[in-house]
Image (spheres, rainbow, N blue to C red):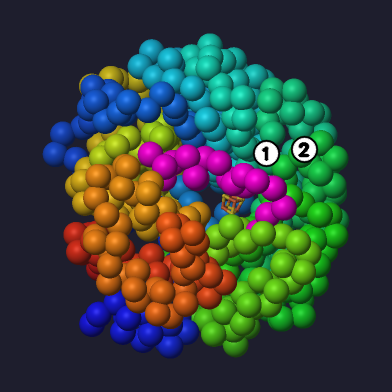
């Protein structure tokens, strides 16, 4: 099947594939023949003078019914203490190798980072300041959160430390829907959390989900409208994804009529795009809408696919250093997570064995990664492509680009830059699949079959 046929037939099916936000996904990772050493990583870090840092905090109060992230829900305070102690050691040790680079972004992701205390954050920021003293003057420092896990004191403390972007999972403003996500707090708590964040931070991102159990078109618009009332700088609107080993999967198998079909999710998406445009939000990806002017609303993401290394710290973090992508082996098994976290905390930093699970990308896959992520998350410039790879974009991806133009899924601005149209954003996960190499397709399929 050629690319045009692929796009036409896949779009006609009205199926919504998983959102592609990275290439390759963790499903393509395997155990390395030998563990990576710090020397392997330093060699791959390239000549870039910058670095991004991601810190994974794998703790939550509860597991949401749709969530497949690596985390533990029943941990003692000492578990978090010893995890932070190990993170502090890792920050210091990695600083010996990369501390001369300018830090473009720091992201505390989870899990729920705001389950950490002021004491924990104080230690982590002191370690970062000492080990990575050079900060870009626009350094983006983000902390993810859940509404029932912070108070004003913690927010004031984070702000004083330099945090300038907060992200909070709201998901729904309807009590019954919220309860079905597995979140045990009230809508009032969610609203109070938004207010507290908006009063303090100049960039707040709210996550909402459409396609939850029992949700209707009206109740979704109600939730979105309530969130918009707060005028957050960014809104991330995710279609619910039903993955294996989640409670939402069981729930959908028992009561499929309580969930949007894939076709309905596309209709809701169209409605969202129109509503967000009417409120002067700029669409930045399939899920993200922002009022941040003149720059990306999520700089770590943009800086990553432009080629700046991403140093992931913590048990479930992913790292990207040139050809090497690596991270902990994956589990959503509740009982397996805590022993893995404890093992991470117990094991001192070992420069000869920093990762055992990941992938070494071929030069061809690095090119595909750049094209796929530039196109679906930002813009794809012919000139930039030529200067990065010494080749012509139109020659390397001629059939793919022609198919996209034919179906009006991209615009070509100034004869140089491809950008997705509204329809292109809508089908960006399908478009992304066109740029997968045969190797990546096979690795992901093998993982799914296992
Ligand atoms: S709070 Fe976030 S990370 Fe934790 S289980 Fe829920 S969705 Fe997953």
Quarter occupied by residue 446: bottom left
Q: Indicate left or right for 307 with 442 as reference.
A: right
Residue in front for this viewpoint, 45 or 119:
45
Question: Residue 306's x, y, as percent?
Answer: 42, 42
Question: Residue 114's x, y, as percent?
Answer: 66, 37
The residue labelled by disc 1 is 165
| Residue 188 visible in rendering | yes
Question: Residue 367's x, y, as percent?
Answer: 28, 50
Residue in front for this viewpoint, 352 or 205:
205
Q: Which residues are magenta?
A: 289-307
Categorize mark 1 by other alpha carbons within 10 Å: few (<14), some (14-19), many (20+): many
* Vertical placement of residue 254 versus 447, above or below: below
Residue drawn where x is 32% and y is 42% of the image? 387
In the picture, which quadrant includes the N terminus? bottom left
Do residues under tags 1 and 2 come within 8 Å of each other at their CB atoms? Answer: yes
Question: Residue 259's x, y, as percent?
Answer: 60, 80
Quarter occupied by residue 181: bottom right
Quarter occupied by residue 237: bottom right
Q: Indicate left or right for 281 with 244 as reference.
A: right
**Which residue is situated farthest in the left direction here?**
33
Is residue 293 within the magenta segment?
yes
| Residue 354 visible in rendering | no
Q: Alpha carbon of mark 1 to alpha carbon of mark 2: how far?
A: 7 Å
- Between disc 1 and disc 2, whose residue precedes? 1
Residue drawn where x is 55% and y is 36% of the image? 107
Q: Indicate left or right for 130 with 429 as reference.
A: right
Q: CB at mark 1 closer than 8 A to ligand 1? A: no
**Numbered circle sitting on residue 201:** 2
Residue drawn where x is 44% and y is 68% of the image? 429
């Amino acid at each position: 099947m050629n690319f045009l046929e692929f796009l036409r037939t896949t779009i006609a099916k009205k199926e919504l594939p998983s959102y592609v936000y990275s290439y390759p996904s963790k499903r393509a990772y395997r155990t390395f023949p030998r563990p990576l050493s710090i020397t392997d990583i330093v060699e791959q870090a390239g000549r870039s003078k910058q670095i991004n840092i991601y810190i994974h905090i794998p703790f939550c109060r509860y597991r949401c019914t749709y969530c497949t992230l690596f985390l533990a829900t029943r941990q003692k305070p000492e578990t978090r203490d010893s995890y932070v102690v190990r993170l502090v050691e890792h920050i210091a040790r990695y600083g010996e190798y990369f501390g001369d680079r300018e830090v473009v972004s720091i992201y505390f992701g989870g899990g729920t980072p705001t389950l950490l205390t002021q004491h924990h954050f104080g230690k982590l920021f002191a370690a970062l300041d000492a080990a990575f003293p050079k900060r870009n003057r626009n350094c983006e420092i983000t902390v993810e959160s859940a509404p029932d896990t912070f108070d004003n004191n913690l927010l004031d403390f984070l702000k004083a430390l330099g945090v300038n972007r907060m992200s909070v999972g709201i998901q729904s403003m309807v009590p019954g829907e919220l309860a079905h996500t597995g979140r045990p707090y009230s809508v009032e708590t969610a609203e109070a959390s938004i207010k507290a964040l908006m009063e303090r931070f100049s960039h707040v991102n709210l996550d909402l989900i459409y396609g939850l159990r029992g949700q209707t078109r009206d109740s979704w618009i109600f939730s979105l409208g309530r969130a918009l009332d707060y005028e957050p700088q960014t809104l991330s609107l995710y279609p619910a994804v039903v993955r294996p080993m989640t409670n939402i999967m069981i729930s959908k198998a028992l009561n499929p009529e309580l969930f949007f079909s894939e076709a309905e999710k596309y209709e809701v998406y169209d409605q969202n795009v129109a509503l967000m445009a009417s409120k002067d939000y700029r669409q930045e990806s399939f899920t993200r809408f922002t009022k941040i002017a003149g720059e990306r609303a999520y700089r770590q993401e943009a800086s990553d696919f432009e080629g700046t290394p991403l140093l992931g710290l913590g048990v479930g973090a992913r790292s990207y250093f040139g050809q090497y992508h690596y991270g902990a082996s994956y589990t959503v098994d509740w009982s397996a997570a805590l022993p893995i976290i404890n093992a991470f905390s117990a094991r001192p930093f070992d420069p000869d064995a920093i990762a055992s699970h990941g992938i070494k990308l071929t030069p061809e896959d690095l090119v595909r990664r750049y094209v796929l992520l530039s196109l679906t998350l930002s813009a794809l410039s012919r000139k930039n492509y030529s200067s990065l790879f010494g080749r012509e974009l139109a020659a390397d991806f001629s059939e793919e680009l022609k198919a996209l133009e034919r179906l009006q899924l991209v615009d070509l601005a100034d004869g140089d830059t491809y950008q997705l149209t509204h329809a292109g954003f809508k089908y960006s996960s399908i478009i992304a699949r066109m740029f997968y190499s045969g190797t990546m397709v096979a690795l992901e399929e093998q993982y799914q079959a296992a």
